[in-house]
């Protein structure tokens, strides 16, 4: 159990957002850890993951996202609102249409890294080329595997 006397505020951080247990690597402040946990919670819903993957390739409208993901427009709108609040997607108005896209490159990087991690055990059981050639990958809910995740898988074998 850690006691207050065992925690030192890092003098290296101007915002003092890092706490350093005596003798250990610095840990982010509790508030930052809560924010990080909230971020990862956004990736815990399959519909949100589908939406994010659909947005990796191009901007899309709610109706387009509903069609691509096989969800209702109402469900898509609800999830997009959640993703907007988490700063994972952004939107712009084009006439009467609202087009959604990923907020920035960090979102694609998180998805790529997650996909690489998920596919890693598959690469250990078979060569990446064999796995990618199978119809199994196309049947997965994240069939739009990004080029970076695919490259990571191919280099893993």
Image: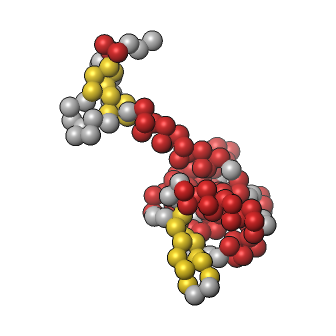
Residue 10 picture quarter: top left
Residue 106 picture quarter: bottom left
Q: Nearer the viewer, residue 68 or 36?
A: 36
Residue 75 picture location, percent across and down: 74, 62
Q: Residue at x 71, y 64 (%)?
A: 76
In this picture, is 143 found above or below 93?
Answer: above
Left or right of 138, for residue 152: left
Residue 121 seen: yes
Residue 117 seen: no
Residue 89 picture location, percent across and down: 54, 64
Residue 19 picture location, percent across and down: 32, 28
Most extreme residue toward the bottom is 95
Q: How many marks?
A: 0
Which quadrant, please, contains the N terminus?
top left
Q: Nearer the viewer, residue 110 or 131?
A: 110
Residue 152 picture location, percent across and down: 53, 56
Q: Residue at x 71, y 57 (%)?
A: 47
The colour style of the image is secondary structure
Q: Residue at x 42, y 32 (%)?
A: 30
In this picture, is 41 found above or below 110?
Answer: above
Left or right of 138, for residue 15: left
Q: Residue at x 64, y 43 (%)?
A: 121
Left or right of 46, for residue 3: left
Q: Nearer the viewer, residue 85 or 145?
A: 85
């Amino acid at each position: 159990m850690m006691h207050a006397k065992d925690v030192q505020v890092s003098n290296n951080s101007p915002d003092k957002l890092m706490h350093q247990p005596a003798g250990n690597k610095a840990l982010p402040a509790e508030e930052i850890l809560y924010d990080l946990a909230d971020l990862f919670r956004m990736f815990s819903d399959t519909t949100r993951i589908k939406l994010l993957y659909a947005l990796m390739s191009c901007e899309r409208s709610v109706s387009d996202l509903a069609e691509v993901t096989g969800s209702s427009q109402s469900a898509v709108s609800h999830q997009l609102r959640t993703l907007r609040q988490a700063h994972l997607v952004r939107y712009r108005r084009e006439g009467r249409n609202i087009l959604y896209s990923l907020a920035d490159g960090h979102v694609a990087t998180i998805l790529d890294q997650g996909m690489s991690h998920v596919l890693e055990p598959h690469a250990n059981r078979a060569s990446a080329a064999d796995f990618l050639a199978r119809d199994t990958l196309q049947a997965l809910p994240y069939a739009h595997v990004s080029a970076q995740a695919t490259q990571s898988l191919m280099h893993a074998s």
